[in-house]
Amino acid sequence: MSHLPTLIADLALILICAGVMTLIFKKLKQPLVLGYIVAGFLASPHITFTPSVIDKANIQTWADIGVIFLLFALGLEFSFKKLVKVGGAAVIAACTIIFCMMLLGVGVGLCFGWQRMDCLFLGGMIAMSSTTIIYKAFDDLGLSKQNFAKLVLSILIIEDILAIVLMVVLSTLAVSSNFEGTEMLFSIGKLVFFLILWFVVGIYLIPEFLKRCRKLMSDETLLIVSLALCLGMVVVADYAGFSAAFGAFIMGSILAETVEAESIEHIVKPVKDLFGAVFFVSVGMMVDPVMIGTYIVPIIVVTLVVIIGQSLFATFGVVLAGKPLKTAMQCGFSLTQIGEFAFIIAALGVSLHVTSSFLYPIVVAVSVITTFLTPYMIRVADPAYLYVDKHLPHSWRKFLTRYTAGSQTVNHENLWHKLLLAMLKIVVVYSILSLAIVFISLRWVTPFFRDTINDFWGSLIGAGLTILLISPFLRAIMIKKNHSIEFTTLWNDHRSNRAPLVATIVLRVVIVITFIMFIIAGLFKASISLMIGTTILIVVLMVGSRRLKRQSILIERRFFQNLRSREIRDEYLGDKQPAYAGRLLSHDLHLADYEIPGESLWSGKTLMELSLAKKYGVHVTSILRGKRRINIPGGNTRIFPYDKIQVIGTDAQLKIFGEIMAQKVELDVETYEKHELILRQFLIDTDSPFIGKTIKESGVRDKFHCFIAGVERSNNMLMTVDMDTPFKEGDVLWLVGEKDNVYQLVGQKN
């Protein structure tokens, strides 16, 4: 008998335990993550009365793969556009929570006398709430549609991206063992540089690649290509000095902006579920019951710190963002748990060998306790608010009311602020792209030319190629926004604005000159005057080149088309409201979607016949019919059953419109009995008016609304009817039609 590899035997045990536990926890209506942890606990060597895994090292490898796919799937659900749209309240609240909880966690660790890295990692673990557990709790309690729930989910989006940043920073600190501010700033700068570089290049290249290969993509090939991109980015991130999880998240977020995002998410889900289960089981395997007993006091303390700290700091953060106290307390009490990212950060500390062995089981125990308490904490938020509001000093209540009311006003956007922010984005993004190209050229391309040709000509070709590749970006840095509405308005508004505006142009030109001189100085030994003259000549040629201008515009247009392709597709299919819906001329107007019922009285009628604008004051902007979209339909456009129509109107108008539109054709016994189809036989005798006539001439279909299913002739065989064959005496017609029509036809005589 052949020997079964230990990896397969261990995987079998893990999945059997996980399968049993998930069924039990599903029955108990508890999060599956806890089931996986319990399964790992049972399959670990710490429990002697159950089978145990043989080789934990192999399982750790599978768990590492699980983290990669978990972060890849999280990236697929994430969107940088979504991050921009979450609003200032979520950003302020999330940053407040993470900063305060990090300090609190470090303080608790220092009080217990733990090492500095243990304290830092503990702070990172307790700073992040569990997206999965909160989603489930809101669904179970029926709160997912409430306003505070939407704010909580926005805060979780910010926390997810900050968790990735925190992982990168903790990894850097763990590797370097350096807590200096300069090291931290360098790590954050490196993170921002590669984050922008990978995202911009990825959005420019990957959607175009998937678009060109779309006809070749089956589910199988799309899965392989997606996982190849994910693992390829993992390798690149590791080469750049980041964690594998960070690379997986970045690739997931890039693919999230493509049209294929939903398909990729669907086909990757089973892979993510499998390896994710192995990861969470491995978390449970690291829980030592003896260690939990030993560290029961820190577990209780950290649990109280998470519950009380998250409640207080989240409430404070949401109030600071300008939300009412009730909303703030509902948000704060919803975030009182730790989950997936706590395990991932803990696993990061273990893999880097910088955290103590006791920290992992403590975090798992705290996570289990806080997860079970989450629904009760959400329920107690309203009674807690009533108690606080009742005992709150009048001066405090008055201050909070004035503060939150003031935050609701819409700030006027300053033209200078808008212009400078746009210029800063352009300079940062295009400078990062240019730096990446310069680095690749000086590191690999130019040395290749030098080795192939000679030093001078190799350097000349390398310099020329590098400047040519970055020239569209350098030109955009100098020229873009110089003719924008903001720039022109400020220039014409007052003379005092002109000097600062000219200064912005000069500063950007200096940045471009610095790039070019750096390339020339790095490849040639030349006098300063020659380098300056050459640089000025190149800058003048860039500014005057129409071809370069066109190339720069095309590059930017392609990027934004790729970035918005999924959004445009969703708008076309009606899965997302168009951008103009939020910018209607009046605050009383909004866009609403309605589906025409199958039995609607409006079915088959034109918009002119319905006269919706005249009768109800609403306007149909689009009709969605399957995968076809009809924008601004004309008066002769007909409405059909199950059409989805997008309508603009006020709340009152749309309410009346919806009620009238929902009216259906009444169906009673007489209606369906009258339209019943029957089959009857009809003999063509001597007196029949149909003798010698064809089907068309007889008017069976046009006049009597019946059709002939078949004809029996002398051989008693039922055969189909030829349209041009005349009827003969003795033919038996098999007629199908509504009862009244059939009897009317049968009663015809000469």
Image: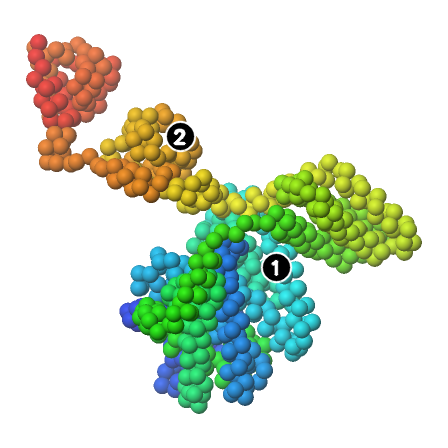
Which of disc 1 and disc 2 is earlier in sequence?
1
692 sits to left or right of 158: left
Measured in 3D between alpha carbons, the distance from the residue under mark 2 to the one under mark 1, in whole angstroms, is: 44 Å
Point out the image quarter for the C terminus: top left
* Residue 633, visible in the rendered structure: yes
Instruction: State the colouring used for the structure image.
Output: rainbow
Give the structural element (helix, strand or loop) at label 1. helix
Q: Nearer the viewer, residue 522 or 223?
A: 522
Observer-nearest of 338 and 642? 338
Q: Nearer the viewer, residue 647 or 255?
A: 647
Q: Position of residue 237 (x, y in %)?
A: 62, 63
- Helix, strand or loop for disc 2: loop
**Residue at image location 68% in from the left, 68% down from the top:** 186
Which image quarter holds the N terminus? Answer: bottom left
The residue to which callout 1 is attached is 195
Q: Amino acid at mark 1?
A: Leu
Residue reaching furthest to the front: 395
Task: Answer whether labels 2 and 1 touch (C-beta < 8 Å).
Answer: no
Amino acid type, residue under disc 2 in the picture: Pro
- Please give the name of the residue rendered at 35% of the width and 56% of the height, measured from the top-left corner: 145
Is residue 473 placed above or below 391 in the rendered structure?
above
Find residue 633 and name its label. Answer: 2
User: To which quarter of the image does residue 648 belong?
Assistant: top left
Image location of residue 606, percent across then percent down? 32, 27
